[in-house]
Amino acid sequence: MESIYPRRVPIVGNLTGTGWTVASQESILSLIVVLGSSVSLVGLIFAFITYSLFSDLRTMSGTALMYLLANMFLTQLFYVVGVGGVQEDSLCLCLAFGIHYLRLAVISWLCVMTYDMLITFRNNVNLNPRPEPVNVLVSRFVKYSLFAWGMPSLSVISASVMRAMTSRQIIDNLNPYNCWFFETDIYNVTFVGPALCCFAAIAVSLFRSWLTVRATVGMQVDKKSRLKMHRKRTLQLHLYGKIAVLMFAVNVFGCVARNGSPASDPVAWIAYNVGHSLQGILVALAVTCNCQVLKIYTRSFSRRRRRVSRNGSEVALFDKRDNDISDTTYLHNLTWDPVPLPV
């Protein structure tokens, strides 16, 4: 890989007694980014497939989460390409624009998810939510998409215009930053500003959702329903809160690293690379390894157990709760066997 991490840090002890062996920061960070991003890419693919397979997860917030996972996957992939060192300045600039757009899109979809959670909690004060009309859902999703895709597009257009108006003599080299982070002024105006606005909206939505949960849970008469509603809605609230805190911390380290210098102060730069490489797997574990998703897993597997008959053909086995005639389309369940006694 190219020498994009100029400083050196002591890593392991020298067994010959001459002191500490010094390894290049470039090789250490490159290894962390590549290995962490590889694990994150696998985890994001698994999470996306999980939300694609189960229809119970394809709600409005689940669909927005799928877009967030897809954008985060592309962000991790583009960043790994930049870590290897890009010789062509035009290709490095294209990667910078792509990462700029994708990172803002991830934050925008998280903002959409938290706002939709607030709307859902407000419109459904009972444990079992009422189904909404299709036209209402479509209209809401179109508005969400316009915001989540349109805001990053405007930011990228603004960044390109500002970069074109900047004198060529003062344009920074993007290779030391893994083909990411435009010039400081462009980065602060077109990325930090919109990102802070989105994180402020996310914080407001999370706080208002918490207040709504307290109000709606207190309205339940039955204690069992009250505890169940509190558990389900608090689980979703904590999930979005953990994702928001993780993404905010990673972007704060990136902002500090860009406004400083990796050569003069590598702490924020190291923290950003470690957090950026591991955020994918952490988000994937958070959205797939919670009790709600695991319950859907076990319920789906128990309903689709199969046995192999003597001739090799597969016959579906149903649980006792699935033996109702209205829950199956098998023709042999629509007949009386044995034949009932005549009246």
Image (cartoon, rainbow, N blue to C red):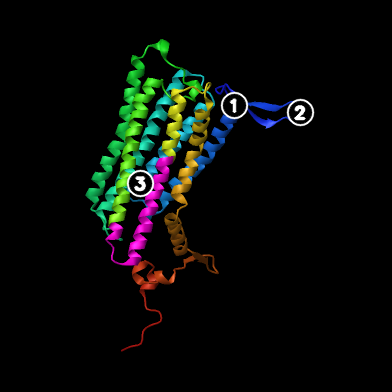
- Callout 2 amino acid: Gly
Q: Position of residue 114 (x, y in %)?
A: 33, 45
Residue name at image x 32 percent, y 46 percent:
207
Looking at the image, do the residues carrying marks 3 and 2 touch, with CB atoms under 8 Å apart? no
Callout 3: helix, strand or loop? helix
Residue, disc 2:
17
Mark 3 is surrounded, within 10 Å at the Cα level, by few (under 14), some (14 to 19) or many (20 or more) other residues, namely some
Camera-side residue of 288 and 324:
288
At 48% from the left edge and 47% from the top edge, which residue is drawn? 285
N-terminal of the two: label 1 or label 3? 1
Q: CA distance from mark 3 to mark 2?
A: 58 Å
- What numbered label is drawn on residue 63? 3
Instruction: Tell me where the magenta segment starts and ends, as one range.
Output: 216-245
Which residue bears the numbered disc 1?
A: 25
**Camera-side residue of 75 and 333:** 75
Nearest-to-viewer mark from 1 and 3: 1
Name the residue located 40 percent from the left edge and 70 percent from the top edge: 321
Q: Is residue 55 visible?
A: no
| Mark positioned earlier in the residue sequence (3 or 2) | 2
Disc 1 residue type (three-letter):
Gln
